[in-house]
Amino acid sequence: MPVVREFTLPDLGEGLTGAEVVRWMVEVGEVIAVDQPVVEVETAKAVVEVPCPYGGVVTARYGEVGQEVPVGAPLVTVAVAPAPGGADEPAVERPLVGYGVAETRRAGRRRVRPGEAPAAAPAPVVAPAQAPAPVVAPAPAPAVVAVISPLVRRIAREHGLDLAAVPGSGPDGLVTRRDVERAIAATAAPGPDVVPRGTEPEGELVPLRGLRRAVAEKLTRSHREIPAATCWVDADATALMALRAQSNQVPGPKLSVLALLARICLAGLERFPELNASVEGEAVRRHRSVHLGFAAQGPRGLLVPVVRDAGRLGTERLAQEMARLTDGARAGTLAPAELTGGTFTLNNYGVFGVDGSTPILNHPEAAMLGVGRIAPKPWVHEGELAVRQVTQLSFTFDHRVCDGGTAGGFLRFVADCVERPGTLLRAL
């Protein structure tokens, strides 16, 4: 007789206590293979596919799209076939293979045919031991609607809109929020209700969920707990840009400006190791290794991928790892472990076309270097007024970890390396 196994939301690591259901990847009554992803969830760190360690027939699933599921709460139940020999223990059961964003394995998915375990109701159901009599095949499941955002589904549900009837304008027919709003407006057009003047809603209320909620909580905590200070300096980056152009003429991996700035930061932290730290209660923990975080824009917003043990990497290897993590951030495929555990952050907000900023520290880190855009500006060079490639460097630090002399020394060292890259070679 089949054994019904309950699969609960596992601990996804890094202290996460729950996740929001983004997309179900299986239906009730579907046969799944061991380690097949069954649901896509959004944590405070990333969107991940969760594989089920059981193979068999899905008899129930728990949680609607957009609903928060706590760690340890049930996700699905699976009717597992008995082991050969009639034992009650399931024949297919093994530990999970991990929770990174994995390649979707759908080859083992199929609908239950007459003679197999029947599709279950929403409540857990155990399939009968004997084969049931032939029955009429169930009606085909409705077409899967290409909608990723829980917000889009909620807006459609609140307005009674059938998403299956909404043409999607996004990639591969993805239904976007604009598509839903356009469909709602078209439905209301024949006889729209007139809202009395002065009673219009005060704009749209967008709940903080997933990544945005995690970012909000972290920044609020940082602003509340850390006495941060910021200093800044303008630097002539003409020589650095020339060095990069010269290096990239040689066959091999190309160096980005961000990778060069990261190498400069790592050299600066070797001179000022007290900045690679965090405050724990009444003590300061100075970290042995530099786990370098850097800001990268992804589809879910601004992410901070982390290069583990960055100080042990050569410049080319550092550039390759940063490029890999940047691509993963843009594709939304980074695992939670690749977005946590940083000890120092490099923030290149110059890519947004701005000169300066006073960033909030990435709690619990004690320091962050910000880099503005590199743009041609008038500059006094060797006693003459000239047009040079100039950038503004800003350095935010936890004043409990060090005083202004240490912070200023680090920033001045970074600026000197930007202006005279040979300084970096002498420092290594």
Image (tube, rainbow, N blue to C red):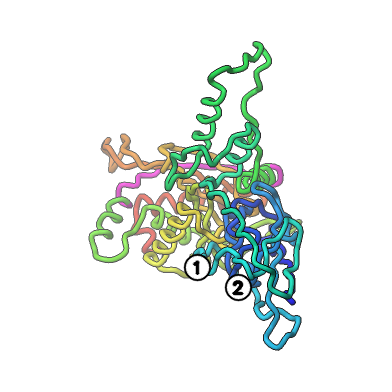
The answer to which of marks 2 and 1 sits earlier in the sequence is 2
The residue labelled by disc 2 is 34
Residue type highlighted by circle 2: Val
Q: Is residue 285 visible?
A: no
Quarter of the picture containing the N terminus is bottom right
- In the rendered structure, the answer to whether residue 129 lies left or right of residue 394 reads right
Q: Residue at x 63, y 31 (%)?
A: 159
- In the rendered structure, the answer to whether residue 92 lies left or right of residue 140 reads right
* Disc 1 residue crowd, few under 14, some 14–19, many 20+, Cα 10 Å: few
Above or below 268: residue 359: above
**What residue range appears in magenta?**
224-240
**Residue 46 location (% of width, % of height):** 58, 55
Disc 1 element: loop
**Residue 35 location (% of width, % of height):** 59, 71
Quarter of the picture containing the C terminus is bottom left
The residue labelled by disc 1 is 107
Q: Nearer the viewer, residue 267 or 154?
A: 154
